[in-house]
Each structure stands twice: as C-alpha cells, then as structure tokens.
Image (cartoon, helix red, strand yellow):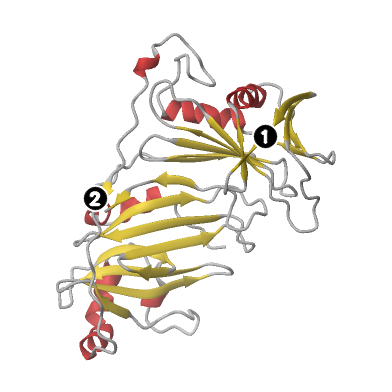
Amino acid sequence: MRSLLPTALMALACPLSAIAAVPAKRLYFQHHDWVVACDNTLACRAAGYAPDDGSTLSVLLTRKAGPGQAIQGRLSLQPEEGQPQPTGALHLHIQRQDLGVLAPAKGEGTHRLNAAQTSALLSALVRDGGVSVTDGAGHRWALSDRGAAAVLLKIDEYQGRLGTPGAVMRKGSTPESSVPAALPVPVVRKAATVDSTPDDPAFARLAASPALRAALRATLKDNSCEGLLETDADVPLSNSPLQIQRLDAQHVLVNVQCWRAAYNTGDGYWVARPQAPFQAQWVTSDAVDYADGQIIAAQKGRGLGDCISQNTWTWNGTAFIATSEVAAGLCRGVPGGTWELPTLVTEIR
C-alpha cells in the first residue's frame, strides 16, 4: 500500500488559491480499536469496533458542536459470508445487564441507540467495558473498549467541553454556555465547465510541450509524480502522456498518472493556462477520477476495500477547492467501510 500524507498536511504544500475559504481545523485520531473524526464545523464522530477483525460489529457516536448537544449512538452489524448471521431482534448488553432491543434505523442497515442505551454505553466504555450485542438465537458479538477513553477525551477537547457538565471525560462546573457554538458550513460555488473538443490539435500540441511538463514539475517539492519523470526503464510510469481538457476559456485541466501500488493508483491534476507561462496550480497527486467540475480521490486501506478514504475538490472558476474529506476508519470486513467519518464538509451551490 502507498503511504499517503494526511490531507491536512498535504494542504500545506498546496497553492493557497486551491484551498482558500476552507477552515483548517479538523481532527482524525486513532487509538487501539477506536477512531474519531472531527470536521470543520466542530462536529465529531467516534467509531468503535470489535476487539479483532473477525467481527464486523461497530458503534458510531456522533456529537454536534455547541452547548447542550446530546451524543447520538448507532450500531452496525454486517457479518461476512460464512459467519453467524443475526436472527431476530438485537439486544444491547453491558456486563450481565440487558439494556433492551436496539431499534432498526429505516433504510440504513444500522440500529439506533436510545438515550438510556447511549448513556449506559458511554459509562461502560470509560469504566469497566463489557459491552456486547446478542440476537434471538443467542449469538453474541463483543465491542472493544480499548481506546474509547482517549477518543472521547479528544472530542471533549476539540469541542471545548472540558470542565463543563456536558463533558464525557472531565466534567466540571464551568457553565455549559461556555462551549463554542458550531461553525457554519462553508459554501463553495461550483462554476460551470465547458466541453472539450475531442482530438483538439491545440491540446495535442500542448500535451507534448516540454515547457508544460516543466511547469507541472515545478509545483512539486520532489519527484513524487512518476509520470512527469524523464523516460526511465526502472520507472514504468515515467514520461506518461499528459491528458488535457478545457475548464473554461482561460483554464485547462491537466492530468497524468503519478503512481501505482498493489491496490491503489493516483493521478496528478493541475489547473493551467492554455499557453506559456501556464501558471500551473497543483491540486492532488492521488486522484482516481474527474467529472463535471469535480476531482475525486479514493484510496483503499487494504485490498479488501473495507476501509476507504475519500477526497473531493470542486472547480469554482479560478481553482479547485477542497470540498469533502472522509476518513477511512478501521478495516473490519464491511465493503466500503462501516461508517462515513468526514473531516471536511461543505455546501456546494
């Protein structure tokens, strides 16, 4: 697997115009069997998993930012083929206590925890553990508490709840009104793009331009895009052909294969002027697709495709703006991943 820089770090190397108007604050943290992703509105989502990857049981705890916000709990159980399948209603258990039936969530393939179940779950996660789910046939699936306390503390810190009555880990008497309100969802206005003329000879000449290749390379701090390297028999992607399509009258989108690994690939994308000096703006070297003004990156955490990180950039008329980041979570046998764990949310208009 190719090792990828977290997007927040990659953004530091990105041209300012490509990431403007997007708040930088966000969080992704993993400890043992728990992860947390907090987005740019200060909303946080913590996901806990089974003690090992032999079970697909997982819990998602979501808390919006602001005073008095309750934690919402959901549970997912999607056993792989060949494993015991749930029969009848699912019950939440903590130690030897049955906390009742878990209500199915319509159309989601998950179950919702009520307020009492969520409260009991939180208490167990930071104290004695012993959380499990049973079905009508007596099958039992355990939920790990390893890492939960650290993850819940991260949420309290990120949302400014430490020392308040609403904190999970470090309660205190600081007024709940001191908790910061949620930040607004940034609005990105998507610009229209034009259709490129197939086999445009001007684009063919541009794609063959050594000066354009040099301009693209100049935006990178190293030789991270193999497709831009001079022909080298030891580098299969070296000197890969450039692909060019028009965005509007003043801008073109250039892409080239950058890297290839066991189960992931990455293309580089740049915005450029159609003539020298090109003024190339690098967007990403990890993309898998472009369509209708949006560049998409999606990388598997492992070959099974049971944990996938995703990023989207949207054209606003002058640059591609980061408009979505979704963390992968842990790889636990559910195709596509168990939960969506966004660290960046926007509204596209």
Q: Amino acid at mark 1?
A: Leu
Picture quadrant of residue 57: top right
Name the side, left or right, on which 16 lies relative to 94.
Answer: left
Q: How far from the left and from the top, in percent, is residue 304? A: 64, 62
User: Quick one: label 2, few (<14), some, or many (20+) residues within 10 Å?
Assistant: few
Q: Please report whichever mark, 1 or 2, sits nearer to the chain's N-terminal start.
A: 2
Residue 102 marker = 1
Name the side, left or right, on which 207 lies relative to 55.
Answer: left
User: Quick one: label 1, few (<14), some, or many (20+) residues within 10 Å?
Assistant: some
Name the side, left or right, on which 23 lies relative to 310.
Answer: left
Name the side, left or right, on which 38 lies relative to 315.
Answer: right
Residue at position x 34%, y 74% in the image: 255
Vertical side of 270 occupied by 91: above or below = above
Vertical side of 67 occupied by 9: above or below = below
Residue at position x 81%, y 39% in the image: 136
Residue at position x 39%, y 21% in the image: 67
Residue at position x 29%, y 87% in the image: 198
Q: How far from the left and from the top, in percent, is residue 111? A: 63, 40
Proximity of marks 1 and 2: CB atoms separated by less than 8 Å: no
- Helix, strand or loop for disc 1: loop
- How many labels, in total? 2
Q: Amino acid at mark 2?
A: Ala
Q: How far from the left and from the top, in percent, is residue 216? A: 28, 71
Q: Which is nearer the eye, 257 or 165?
A: 165
**Cα–Cα gap, marks 1 and 2:** 43 Å
Q: Residue under circle 2?
A: 20
